[in-house]
Image (spheres, rainbow, N blue to C red):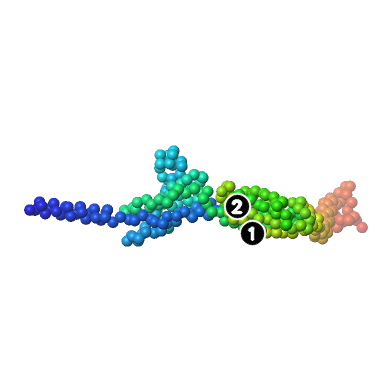
Amino acid sequence: MRLRRRFFDSLLILVLNIVTNYAWLLPSPWGISMESVNMRHLLKWHRQQSPCSSIIYSVQFQGEFELRIMNGSWEDADGCQQVTRTECDLTFDLGSDSDYNIRVRAECGRHVSPWAELGRPFNRRETILTVPAMTVTTMGDALQVTFKGLPLIVGVTVTIWKKGELGKSSLRVITVQQNLLHIDALQEGAVYCVKAQAHLDTHSKSSSTDTQCVSITGPGPTWLKPTTVTVIVVILAGLVFFLSCTEAFRRFREETPQEEAMQLGAARLSRMGRQRHLHQGRCLFCGQAGHQCDSCPEKPGNGRAR
């Protein structure tokens, strides 16, 4: 009887342990989606309903290299391991034009949910390109087209034409490294129009920018040219330096006479002192043969006979 009771107690403990560890399964994240704009790839998902209040998430990806060369292994996404947020920036992880499988799972203490995968493989060439921010300015007989915030590996096709002659437009392509287009030798007094479109390849393009038209005023005054402006700046700098040197030289000339007068006075005093010492030395030998004592003071007992 006692043995049977002990058996039932052990069985009950085993059942409770199974229920505690396996009956309650942590559900997987849901609503997984990829938001890719201008080559920035952001994976997002929804938080699942769970009694656990401190859920963390981890993300993995599998590209063509992992699938074919690494025997189907998965790589942990940098910066997206055991995080509390419900999004992950995969911009630098998805660094090639291959298809990527992506998955995410939840963790709560010892409980781990099954992996939940993105509905289909993602390729970064599916990114959505927005209209580039374009600025058009004129400089004499030239115009400059600049762009701000272009994403990496994205080029821009710029269309330029004289107003009323769209059929004779010209195309220029610039990269994100250039970021600037300079077109000179345009017709003075004419109006030129510009529009641009970002592109990743022949199949992935953004919408075109609004058309911007500017009037070419001509070469303009010579002093407005960049080279001339540079020369003027150098000349002005030289003039300022010359005036500064002139002022310093004037102050030096004003201070020099005073210093020369002080040096001359010191020299005179020194010469008078040397003469006085020489005179006193001669008078020591007054009365001796060969020495004149006319200018020496008379010594007691050594005066001349009257």
In this orientation, does residue 9 appear? yes
Q: Which mark is residue 267?
A: none
Name the residue furthest left: 1
Q: Which residue is mark 1?
A: 210
Q: Position of residue 11 (x, y in %)?
A: 17, 52
Quickly name the residue at label 2.
Answer: 198
Q: Is residue 190 above or below residue 63?
A: below
Residue drawn at x 18%, y 55% is 12
Q: Is residue 254 left or right of residue 44?
A: right
Residue depicted at x 21% and y 55%: 16
**Viewer-closest of 143 and 226:** 143
Residue lying farthest to the right in this orientation: 306
| Kind of residue at badge 2 | Ala
Label 2 or label 1, whichever comes before in sequence order? 2
Q: Amino acid under label 1?
A: Asp
Residue 207 location (% of width, % of height): 59, 56
